[in-house]
Amino acid sequence: MNNTLETVLLITRNGMGSADPALQITLIKKYLQLLLDGDLLPSVICFYTEGVKLVVEGSPILDLLRKFESKGVHLAVCSTCLSFLGLQDLVQVGIVGGMPDIIEAQWGANKVITL
């Protein structure tokens, strides 16, 4: 089953939920892996605020994110957030853009899921 009908994921945390940081990473890994395994692919995954930490050097989910990219999922990364956190030179996956890209993805979506 392929659900690429303009579903957008918003990842705003360095993981998933507001638990212990190790649990947050465990949960986001599991969630993304299950999406891949089920061929439940969003059209875009937007990373902003603390979520940008997941696309930079040292992120424990880079391999998963590369798999999404290889399947045609657009990874949009907030340049303002990267700059604020001093991470702009460490990006490993995705396209660095800005708020206009996030807005365009949200308004073009049939469904927006915030993690």
Image: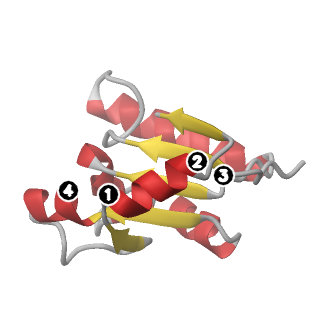
Displayed quadrant of residue 98: bottom left
Q: State the residue position of label 3.
A: 42
- Dot 2 amino acid type: Val
Which residue is pictured at 49% across the width and 64% down the height? Answer: 75
First along the sequence among labels 3 and 1: 3
First along the sequence among labels 2 and 3: 2
Q: Is residue 81 above or below residue 51?
A: below
- Dot 3 amino acid type: Pro
Distance from disc 1 to disc 2, alpha carbons, whole Å, reads: 14 Å
- Dot 1 amino acid type: Met
Q: Is residue 86 left or right of residue 101?
A: left
Distance from disc 4 to disc 3, alpha carbons, whole Å, reads: 22 Å
First along the sequence among labels 1 and 2: 2
- Dot 4 amino acid type: Cys
First along the sequence among labels 4 and 2: 2
The single residue placed furthest to the bottom in the displayed view is 89
**Residue 25, image x, y percentages:** 40, 40
**Residue 104, image x, y percentages:** 49, 57
Q: State the residue position of label 2.
A: 8
Callout 3: SS: loop
Q: Is residue 65 left or right of residue 71?
A: left
Callout 4: SS: helix
Q: State the residue position of label 1.
A: 99
Distance from disc 2 to disc 3, alpha carbons, whole Å, reads: 6 Å
Q: Is residue 115 above or below residue 18?
A: below
Q: Mark 2 and mark 1 in contact (Cβ < 8 Å)?
A: no
Q: Report how many numbered discs are placed on residues in the image.
A: 4
Q: State the residue position of label 4.
A: 81
Q: Is residue 46 left or right of residue 31?
A: left
**Residue 83, image x, y percentages:** 13, 65
Which residue is pictured at 32% across the width and 39% down the height? Answer: 13
Distance from disc 3 to disc 1, alpha carbons, whole Å, reads: 19 Å
